[in-house]
Image (cartoon, rainbow, N blue to C red):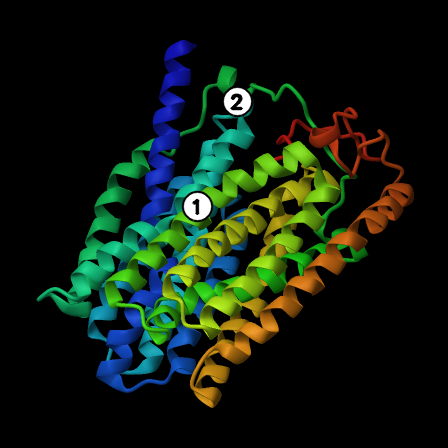
Amino acid sequence: MADIRKNRYAILVCGILTMLMFGTIYAWSIFIPPLEAEFGWTRSQTSLVFSVAMIGLSFGMLSIGPLSKRFSLRACFVASTSLIVVGLFSCQFITQLWQLYVFYGVCCGLGSGMSYTVWTTNTLAWFGDKVGFASGVLVMGFGMGALVLGSLASALIYSPLGWRLAFVVIATLALVEALVAINFIQQPPPEVAALKPKRDAVGVSLPGSKTVREPSFWLFCIWRSVVMGAGGAVIAEASVMMTGIGSSIAFATAAVGVLGLGNGFGRPLGGILYDRIGQNRTLVVLPALALAVSVGMAVAYWFEIPWLFASFLLIQGLLYGMYAAINTSYMRTTFGQRDLAMNTGISAVVLAPFNLVFPLVAAALFEWTGGYEAFFVLVPAFALMSLVCGALCKPANGRLRMKYGATGAAALGDVAGEGEGHAVGKSADHEAGVPDRA
């Protein structure tokens, strides 16, 4: 048993490396300057690439649920790897804007989302007793893709190789890593699959068809989407925002890396915060922090202070990662474990339009005004909207609990944060689940 448990950590490490390598889409802003310089594309046009990729990410995550019922996880991983490698490799041949949307946006976006779900599913099957820890460090790797790939891409782009061969090198590395990683997609033995968490907290058990009818679902989606949409716009254009206020390319690249670092570490931190202070407080604390950061970032941009703006980029990355991490915890605590994959997939798709619109708004305001000042005026309003929705989630969840008869004082609230016991739903399935963490 001890050897088997050691082997599962090898699977976890491989999962982190795969997520790190396949977090390609978060490094997009590094490619914007050379592409605009060569083809004369506008900021709205290049920003749309990231929006398309994020939409592809959402649908890629959702697709693994039905696909895994017909095909093995290995087959799904082959498909996701093929999409990413073909997409990156094909980017070297682009001459038209639509090709960039297809190769980087659709192919890399879908592939990254599919790989994300494959590896969370595969790894968490081995960590039934430590799923919060495993999921936190696993998605940390995905969020840190901008740090690793951004630095690598920048070095390649501004070397004699140029941006075209930069895509080829990254595609090759992704393929090599995937050929190793596929050997670590395995079903756990029965004794490992049977491992259970020491404490479990599950809300009412609702399928997706009923979940989408509940105000608590939509309040949470708005809570998450407005801040993550604005954060996605910053991620998409972080490099050019930095250079626009006087930063060197090298410092802008480093700032993008710091943003990716924050995005990565924010994910396990989000789970820890959720566990420590509980659901209701987390839904208020995070948007309050986002409001403060949005004001600070605006000041740094308006007064053209690159080092201060870079500092707020780190915090912005942390908040983006924390918001992303809360999704699974909230869906599970509120709507149960049985339909968790479908409910989290639906919430990911709800986020997609925000990932499309917000970067386009930022780019349009840039083209209209010649800077991002107007965009940073709007961002605090989105954080305030998130704060209001977070505060409204508590009474909405209370009504949900009464409606479906969930028992337990902490059924939809602060289980881990206040230790008020277990929660069970109205349904009697009481399935073994995932602890209340991201």
**Residue that appears at 31% across and 48% down:** 21
Residue sticking out furthest to the left: 160
Mark number displayed over residue 264: 1
Circle 1 SS class: helix
Q: Is residue 216 visible?
A: yes
Left/right of residue 261 with respect to residue 87 in the rendered view: right
Kind of residue sitting beneath label 1: Gly
- Please report whichever mark, 2 or 1, sits nearer to the chain's N-terminal start: 2
Give the image quarter of residue 353. Answer: bottom right
Kind of residue sitting beneath label 2: Ala
Left/right of residue 223 with respect to residue 373 in the rendered view: right
Circle 2 SS class: helix
**Residue that appears at 79% across and 30% down:** 424
Q: CA distance from mark 2 to mark 1?
A: 27 Å
The one nearer the camera, 366 or 344, is: 366
Residue 295 in percent (x, y) is at: 57, 65
The one nearer the camera, 137 or 387, is: 387
Q: Residues within 10 Å of mark 2 (few under 14, many from 20)?
A: some
Give the image quarter of residue 93. Answer: bottom left
Label 1 near label 2: C-beta < 8 Å?
A: no
Q: Does 82 sit above or below residue 412? A: below
Q: Does 111 sit above or below residue 47? A: above
* Quadrant containing the C terminus in the rendered view: top right
Left/right of residue 54 with respect to residue 350 in the rendered view: left
Q: Residues within 10 Å of mark 1 (few under 14, many from 20)?
A: many
Mark number displayed over residue 193: 2
**Residue that appears at 63% across and 57% down:** 224
Residue 311 in percent (x, y) is at: 43, 55
